[in-house]
Image (cartoon, rainbow, N blue to C red):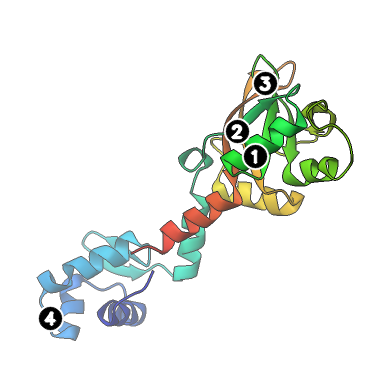
Amino acid sequence: MELTKRQKKILEIVKEKGPITGEQIADKLNLTRATLRPDLAILTMAGLLEARPRVGYFYSGKTTNQLLGEHIRNLLVKDYKSHPIVVQENTSVYDGICTMFLEDVGSLYVVKKEGNLVGVVSRKDLLQIAMGKQDLQSIPIGVVMTRMPNIVTCNAEDTLYYAAVQMMRHEVDSLPVVRPIDKDKNELEVIGRISKTTLVRAFVELGQP
């Protein structure tokens, strides 16, 4: 968040004199209360100032970086997830490569006919098998995929920050967004996808005025 010169001056006054009323701030700047109202509203909504009735404005003590960090930690996976690209475990490696190319994704999520997640296959997995002399049309993706429970997932209610940490920690380019089908059997349905591109998009949106 980039502050105007007047907003920075307001912060300085509140830091030094707070608690202080809007009228007192206006007097120090030789402006009217009405002129300052939008600036005070922005600073309060941004969390840089706190306002209390009959008392005035306080400095929250938080920097813009701290406030940005708090905002990022409140972004939820469900608001940013994209459509998952899924294949069956009997899909051939050849068809998997074609699907990955046409959909422009780095990973495919492998599901059973019932729709529950059984594996993930990455671009690296398909590249490794393609470098051999095997018949790619006869090899099922189930042979080369990473199987459950060795798959890192996230839920729709998780934060985007949590998803980003998981991707970095496990060095993967995306996470399947899942929800339980059968808790007793630990079966999961894929309902979305969070990728590094998702994180970049969210970051760009935060920087827009």
Viewer-side label of 2, 4: 2
- Relative to 204, does residue 140 appear above or below in the rendering? above
Q: Secondary structure at mark 2?
A: loop
The reply to whether dot 3 and dot 1 touch (C-beta < 8 Å) is: no
Residue where numbered disc 4 is placed = 31
The reply to whether dot 1 and dot 2 touch (C-beta < 8 Å) is: yes
Question: Does residue 62 show up?
Answer: no
Viewer-side label of 1, 2: 1
Q: Secondary structure at mark 3?
A: loop
Residue where numbered disc 2 is placed = 85
- Relative to 18, does residue 198 appear above or below in the rendering? above
- The residue shown at (83%, 34%) is 144
- The residue shown at (73%, 24%) is 91
Q: Quadrant of the C terminus?
A: bottom left
Please tell me which of labels 3 and 1 falls first in the chain.
Answer: 1
Please tell me which of labels 2 and 4 falls first in the chain.
Answer: 4
Viewer-side label of 4, 3: 3
Viewer-side label of 3, 1: 1
Residue where numbered disc 1 is placed = 100
